[in-house]
Amino acid sequence: TAALTVEDGQVAVFVAVDHCSATCVGIHAALHGTRHEALEPVRQGVTEHFGGVEKDAAQGLAIRHDHGSQYMSRDFQKEIAWLGAMSSPAFVRAPEGNGCAERFIRTLKENLLWVRTFRPVEELRLALPWARAVDLHVVGARGVNAVYQPVVRLTAQADLVIVEQANRLL
């Protein structure tokens, strides 16, 4: 998806969402939406769940993505094959095939991207870990105007620090 910043204009935001739990496993903002930038959330998720980015580290993982040029590019496809993952493109013009990611992006927009003003892209990058620490799919299920307490995943002590830092930014 895209976000607007004051200094850099439109920037790209890439996410990787676990299809089973609907939690964010990787998120990245970049000045340009290139195939190399699109790989960053995948690398984050592989590092977190498979222990690191190396050949065949993600053996058996299927990566669902849309037909955007970043995801269909030879470089992106070669990298996920090198990781041992399989490409699983959603059907053309069928966003529901990638529904978990689409719902996550919508909730990210409603709770962060559309309500905050970011000056440079780096400021946006600093705010994005909040989306990984807070279960946005739970937030989205409660409705946009609902008052809620963030649900924190307690998988790592770092998540708690990230939430505290992000709340100070908000």
Image (cartoon, rainbow, N blue to C red):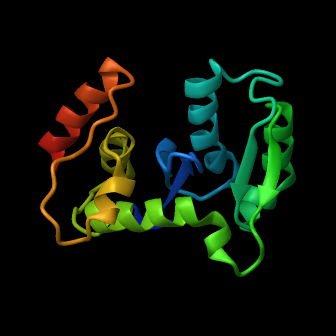
Q: Which residue: 15% across, 48% down?
A: 149
Q: How many marks?
A: 0
Picture quarter containing residue 5?
A: bottom left
Q: Position of residue 102 (x, y in %)?
A: 53, 66
Looking at the image, residue 169 sits to the left or right of residue 33; the answer is left
Q: Residue furthest bottom?
A: 93
Q: Which residue: 39% across, 61% down?
A: 8
Residue 6 showing in the rendered view: no
Picture quarter containing residue 159?
A: top left
Looking at the image, residue 160 sits to the left or right of residue 28; the answer is left
Q: Position of residue 36 (x, y in %)?
A: 68, 46
The answer to whether 63 is drawn above or below residue 81 in the figure is below
Residue 33 showing in the rendered view: yes
Q: Which residue: 61% across, 47% down?
A: 37
Q: Which residue: 81% across, 29% down?
A: 59
Q: Nearer the viewer, residue 170 or 87?
A: 87
Q: Nearer the viewer, residue 40 or 20?
A: 20
The answer to whether 110 is drawn above or below residue 62 in the figure is below
Q: Position of residue 107 (x, y in %)?
A: 36, 64
Q: Position of residue 108 (x, y in %)?
A: 37, 60
Q: Nearer the viewer, residue 155 or 161?
A: 155
